[in-house]
Every structure is written in structure tokens, then in C-alpha cells.
Amino acid sequence: MRSVKRLSQAGLLALVWLSTSLHAGLQPPQAAVASAHPLATQAGENILQAGGNAFDAAVAVAAMLAVAEPSGSGLGGGGFFLLHSAEDGRKHFLDARETAPAAIRAAMYLDEEGRPQRELLRRGPLAAGIPGLPAGLVQLAQEFGSMPLKQLLEPAIRVAQEGFEIDAKLARTMAYREADLASYAHSAAVFLDEQGEALAAGTTLKQPDLARTLQKLATFGRAGFYSGSVADEMLRSVRNAGGVWTAEDLRNYAVKMRRPLVLGFGDWQIVTAPPPSSGGLVLGEIFQMLDLMGFTTVEDMGLRRHMLIEAMRRAYFDRARYMGDADYVPVPSRRLLAREHAQQWLESYSPRHATPSAELSPEPIASVGMGMNTTHFSILDGQGNRVSATLSINFGLGAAFVAGRSGVLLNNEMDDFVIAPGVPNGYGLVGGEANLVEPGKRMLSSMTPTFLEGAERVAILGTPGGSRIITMVLLGLLDLMEGRSAAEVVAAPRFHHQYLPDVVQLEQGGFDDEAKELLQLRGHPIKELSRQYGNMQVVVWDQDKAKVDAAADPRGVGRASSFVVRPSIEQQALELIP
Ligand code: DON
């Protein structure tokens, strides 16, 4: 077993860029893929068995999810890929988040009295940012992959062409968005039957137009999507339906390579998402507060949950106030992560009772959040390369708008912007100036693809779930630090606080009366949700046990697989050479 340098004094948090990292050089006994769809997991496994690396597999998995889980992500959306390269131990954060079109103005989403017109942020082309995933896949394959893009996209193209069986989860999402899908001819042609009803579970969904667009991407790289016939068709259909995209918007779209945020908690290192995700900063603030509270020494479950909720409340306050696209607005990352900032927050903390959110600020009140879509996958290859990717088109089936014969279902990610300070979005999140919609800007995200690294354990995790993503990742990290298995982590019951609305959201069926009473005793208003949420995908490599373990969230229809990568004939031959 390798000894690992102690990263920090207990709890010391650092915003640092580590060029090399723990575990460089070690090889896992197995590879693993966990994703939200069995076809995507299979595509990733096949690429790894064919000699591809984790980055190749990530391209194949993401492309397959774009076809087989159109409710969660797709070519019309975007996302974040957190990467660990085993060769040099370096981490990278590939930001393929959507951007606001140049002609967009916040006023376009308001009526004459300045009231938000929610519909415009939820469906149709004004809801859609400029897609980032196609450029992200091309860059991932070129810079990190080892196989041609054509080979990586081939399985997705085949399934788009030949079709796949619709599962119950996708059928439910299509039924939920039926009226929206029916408003747009090309959406109806793909997702509704001749009677205008959502396709039922068990029927075959074929997407020949999408197959052609994927083929163009495979042949011409980013030019196959951001210019030429696919771009022309998307622009024609977007503009006909009242959207404002231009050819320049598409041509100018750029992936950003960023430094991941690296946090420390005890002996653990957490590598996670920087802005324009709020995930890493919110996690960092929470860990800093937990450390000051002495969280890890507390055994009383009621007090532990209280501590977590109070830290969540305060960090989400800062999310609303300070966080946005750091390329456009100054995000005070260092100050937010500083120990002094956590100390200030804890001046209003009491272990005995809840702090009402209204006492933190006189900001306007938000409505209740929702959301179950987006997608996450985690990959570990036989060399120890890792990918943690969260991809999105925002709501289930995004803007419900298929852009003409391109077959591309557009996102409704513009709803992640603030259109006016204090006006909540679809997840009940409020925000301020930092996340106001601006041309070219990336909308603030909660997507938090993450690695956990300790002396003997490495984990890859993430989940969809809108504003609840960050607290799910937090609970997952704490469980992983306590040695729980991948299956235990994905199945654990979840709770959430996001500053506003000022309630503790409890997952349906997850908490007994005693747990609820303990929260109520401290004055926490509780909202028991009518359903479960999240779709977490976890891979864990326990180096002391030489074991790789993977699990897909039982709330979804995903599949996790860990397997020994068979050496190729060439590798076997090389090994025989003395
Ligand atoms: O980037 C974000 O934070 C959101 N667009 C994620 C949406 C999501 O997770 C939907 N699923 N519930």
C-alpha cells in the first residue's frame, strides 16, 4: 500500500491546483462504467474492451446517452467533464456548458410590466442556450482519446438509426411533456405517435435525423455541427419559432478548459467543479463550516443533520448572492472558501435551533424546486484514468423543441440564469447580479462531477437533480469517507436545504418519525417530498482491498459494471517478448 502525504491539517481547505496527484501510477484491478442507461454503460464497456481509454469511453457513453436517454442530455445541451489522467496525475475540467446567444436580453423574458414570462424559459427556442456537448465530445476525443471519433460515435449512430426500447422513466417524462412536444411539429414527429400521444414504454424510438447529425459530427468534427447543413437547419428552425440564434453564435461556441477546484477535508482530497458551476464553491464552504463545527467528532445523528442543514443554508445563500460565470463577473472564490468566511457564517449558528433563512437576509422568497433529469456517468479504466461527467439539457426533454430536420432536441438551460434579481427559477433558486443573463455568458450550474481521493480509496461520483445536486454529492462524499460501498452510497436517503425556500426537503420514505422529530425539535420546517430524487452513478476503487466497485442509483434505470479488461492480442504478444 502506498503512503499518501497528509494533504492538510485537519480540515484545512485549500483552493489549489495540484499538477500531480495521489494515486498516479497505480493501476486498478478492474475497469468500471456506471451510467444512467444500460446501452450507454455497454457502449463504454465495449470501447474499453477494444483498447480505448476512459476518455474514449466517455465520448461513446455521452453520445449513447444523447440517443437513448434524450430526457437527460443530448447534442442540443452541454455539460462538464472532470478528467484524471493516470499518466501524469493531472486533472482537467472540460467545460462544455451552453452559452447565451449574442442577441439575448433579459427583457425578452419579461412582459411589459416586468413580470417574468416563465413559459419562454421552459419551452421553445428562446429557452435554449448555444449547445456545448458536440464541441465537448470532439475536444475530449482529440485531446485525450486514443481512437477516431468515428469509431466512438458509431454505436450511438447505430442505435439512433435502428431504434431502442423506451423504458418506463423516459415514457413518463414524454407523457409529462406531451403538451409541449405537441406544440412543435418536429418534436411531435419524434416523440409522439400518430394520435399525438407520447410513445409508450416498450415501443421502439428511432431517430434517423439525429443519426444523420451524429454522422456529420463523426465525419467533419465540430464543423459538422456548428456550420454547414446541420447549423443551417437548426438556425432556420430556431428563428422561425421566435429564437434569436445566429450563425456567429454557433461558430463562436468555445469549450473552456478550466482548473478543477481542489478541496481538503481531513485527510481527503475532493476534486470538483469550478465556476460556472456553483458545485465546488458550495461544497467547499460547507466542508469548511462542518470542520469548524467539529462535525466528524459528532455521533448524534440529529445534531449531524442539523449541522449539515445549517451549512447548506448558508452556502446556498452565497450561491444566490455571489455565484455566476467567472469569465463575466468577479466571483470571490477565495473569499468564499476562506476559513474566516466560514467563521463569520457560524456566528449566527446554534447547535440547538434552526436559523431562519430570513434572518440571513431580507431577500425575496422563492418557490419550491423540482427536477429529476440531466445525467451523470463515472468511468475508471484499467490504467487508472478517470472521468466524472454530468451532462444536461436541463428539464426532462429540455425545451421540448427539436430543431427541424437536424433531429437535435434543444436545451432549456436559459432558465439557469437569473432574469431579474430575486425571481426564482424552475428549481426555486434565487440569484443576483452575478448570474444575470448576458450575451455569450454561461449560466450558473449546480452540476458537480467529483472525485474523492484518500489514502486507500478513490471514488468517482455525481448525479442529476437540479439545485439538489450539490447536497446529494455532499452526502455521497461523507458516506464514501465513512467507507460505505458504492451500492450503499447511491441508495442512501437524501435531504436538502437551499436557503430559500426555508424548508428541509426530505426524500419520500427516507426518514422515520424520530429523525423528523429531531429536526422539528430544533425548529426546522420540513417538507416531505412526494417522490425520490437523483440518479447517482458511483465508481469506487479501494486500493487496500484491490477492489473496484460500481453502482447505479436504484431510483433510475441505469446500470453499473466493473470488469477485467482483456489484453489485446498485440499486448499479449508484447508481454511474451522477453
Ligand atoms: O446545470 C444545472 O444546474 C441544471 N441545468 C441541472 C438540471 C438537472 O439536474 C435536472 N434534473 N433534475
Image: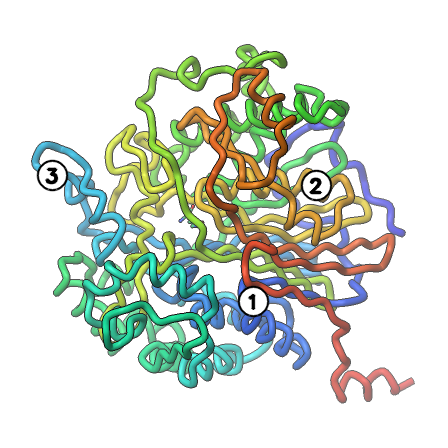
Residue wearing tag 1: 58
**Residue at left offset 46%, top offset 62%:** 169
Residue 62 vs residue 324, the one in the foreground: 62
SS assignment at label 3:
loop
The percent coordinates of residue 170 (x first, y second) are: 43, 64
* Residue 183 placement: quadrant: bottom left
**Front disc: 2 or 1:** 2
Q: Point out the tag, 3 or 2, that comes first from the N-terminus.
A: 3
Q: Amino acid at mark 1?
A: Ala
Q: Amino acid at mark 3?
A: Asp
**Residue at left offset 64%, top offset 74%:** 45
User: How many C-alpha atoms fall within 10 Å of the one at disc 3: few (<14), some, or many (≥20)?
Assistant: few
Q: Is residue 252 left or right of residue 300?
A: left
Residue 245 visible in the snapshot:
yes
**Residue at left offset 67%, top offset 47%:** 489
Residue wearing tag 2: 479
Residue wearing tag 3: 111
Residue 147 vs residue 446, the one in the foreground: 446
